[in-house]
Amino acid sequence: MDRIAKFLAYEGRAILVCANTTKLVEEIRKLHDLTPTTTAVLGRFSTISGMIGFTEIKEKDDFLTIQINGQGPVGNLISIVRRDENVSKVKVSIDNPHVELPLKSNGKLDVGGAVGTNGFLNIINKNEITDSNYNGLVPLVSGEIAEDFTEYFAKSKQKPAVVALGVLVNKDGVKASGGYMIQLMPDATEEDILNIEKALEKAPTISKMIENNTSLEQIAKTVTGDENVLILAQELSLKYECDCTRERFERGLISLGKEELNKIIEQDGMADTVCHFCNKKYHFSKEDLEKLLKEIK
Ligand SMILES: [Zn+2]
């Protein structure tokens, strides 16, 4: 099972969230029939979404929506994170799952080229019951995702952070995936910052550490340079789960309006809808659509 955990370093002057998302990302790869490039894109995106959801979702009915659109070949990316007891439930969608780009000159998958840089990163934290909303919108920096979220923390949250995300994928599937984010608290000292910088210089990449079965606690020690990190929040498991229902697609068809729905009935005589998060199909017959039509006032 994938794990995610929160740690305190330097007596609480830095907070660290660390995740192993190997199984989650392999499931996403299969579900969306991804290429190596889009596996890296959605792997990084789902990992940071899970980590932010872990820190920001406080109540049961809160959910987090993150959207990235950099006008690159993959199109729009959306993630939604919910929380249920000790499980973070993540789902993601991508417009063009089959995009594959040549490797960059450094041998890495071209995530930035696939995502693009001409657009925004948008984070919406919503509570369905109180209907309260938090909204953070920042321009993309590189489309490489980790850098874009580092910028989000600096600009939108006014909190300096280090974000690292890594996905190791070959033709057979995801070999390792994970990430960490370190946030400095206002009382972090110059020495703490220097220690963290030194630790990060020496640390292997996150995908290498996950591939080597390094525990989350050991990763936390390695990247902060603090041997006395404390686990702060109980570990949660991360899993892929879509909560789509037929009713939601009915509401979607109703929201098209009388005229549009009539057109579908006359032209197609039915409607097949597909959930972009789990690829589940919902079929609506002519009778189904006529019933929905009657619900429109
Ligand atoms: Zn679904």
Image: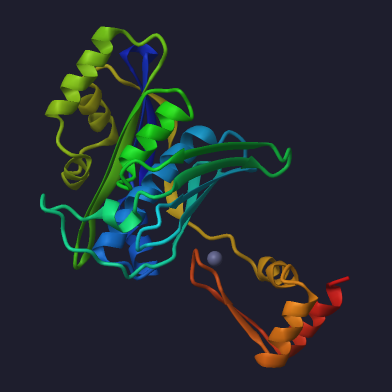
Residue 159 in the image, given as x and y percentages of width and height: 42, 23
Left or right of 57? Residue 207 is left
Question: Which image quadrant shows ligand 1?
Answer: bottom right
Image quadrant in which you'd find residue 288? bottom right
Picture residue at 49% right of the left edge, 45% below the top: 87
Give the number of callouts.
Answer: 0
For image coordinates 23% across by 27% down, the residue present is 223
Q: 140 above or below 75?
A: above
The residue nearer to you, when weighing 210 against 86, is 210
In the image, farthest residue toward the right: 297
* Left or right: residue 34 compared with residue 67: left
How is colour applied across the structure in the image?
Answer: rainbow
As drawn, 55 above or below 194:
below
Q: Is residue 6 above or below residue 130?
A: above
Q: Residue 18 appears at what percent x and percent y? A: 33, 35
**Quadrant holding the C terminus:** bottom right
What is the residue that sits farthest to the front in this orientation?
A: 118
- Residue 226 in the figure: left or right of residue 5: left
Q: Position of residue 293 (x, y in %)?
A: 81, 79
Residue at position x 20%, y 21% in the image:
197
Residue 143 location (% of width, % of height): 33, 48
Q: Quadrant of residue 32?
A: bottom left
Can residue 15 be seen in the rendering of this structure?
yes
Residue 23 seen in the current view: no
